[in-house]
Amino acid sequence: MKKNQEKLGTGKGILILLIPIVGIFIWLNNRDTNPKKAQDALILTAVGFTADIIFAVSRKMKQQNTLKGTETEIKSITE
């Protein structure tokens, strides 16, 4: 395999999904010398950021639903 066609390793891919900012640094470091690795890092960064946003919104919605349930319980107890 040519040097400029090296792929991103599995470990780095998992790290980028868990901590997407790492992917930006890998992309910056490899965009001129290894475009395939840089492209893979950028794609995984986008997937990682998207997943983080989805999980954050989901978590926030769950917290709000839990608070609404607690308010209802408190009202029923006090009445």
Image (spheres, helix red, strand yellow):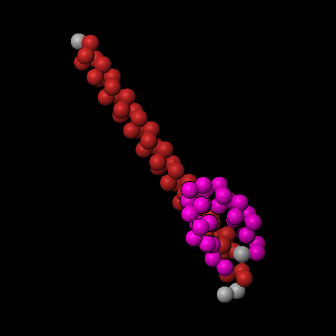
> 34 above or below 55?
below
| In the foreground, 13 or 49 | 13
Kindly tell me whether residue 60 is visible in this rendering.
yes
Q: Residue at x 56, y 63 (%)?
A: 14
> 69 above or below 51?
above
> 41 above or below 66?
below
Q: Which quadrant of the structure image shows residue 30? A: bottom right
Relative placement, left or right, of 49 versus 60 is: right
Which residue is farthest top? Answer: 79
Q: Which quadrant of the structure image shows residue 27? A: bottom right
Residue stretch rendered in magenta on the structure? 6-33
Which residue is farthest bottom? Answer: 1
| In the foreground, 34 or 78 | 78
| In the foreground, 28 or 22 | 22
Q: Main secondary structure of the magenta part?
A: helix
Residue 70 point in image, percent of width and height: 33, 25
Determine if the magenta segment contains residue 7.
yes
Q: Which quarter of the rendered picture does the N terminus lie within?
A: bottom right
Q: Residue at x 70, y 86 (%)?
A: 2
Determine if the magenta segment contains residue 34.
no
Q: Residue at x 76, y 72 (%)?
A: 32
Label count reads: 0
Residue 11 point in image, percent of width and height: 59, 67
Relative placement, left or right, of 33 versus 47 is: right
Residue 25 point in image, percent of width and height: 71, 60
Q: Which quarter of the rendered picture does the C terminus lie within?
A: top left
Kindly tell me whether residue 46 is visible in this rendering.
no
Which residue is farthest front? Answer: 11
Q: Residue at x 52, y 54 (%)?
A: 50
Residue 48 point in image, percent of width and height: 55, 57
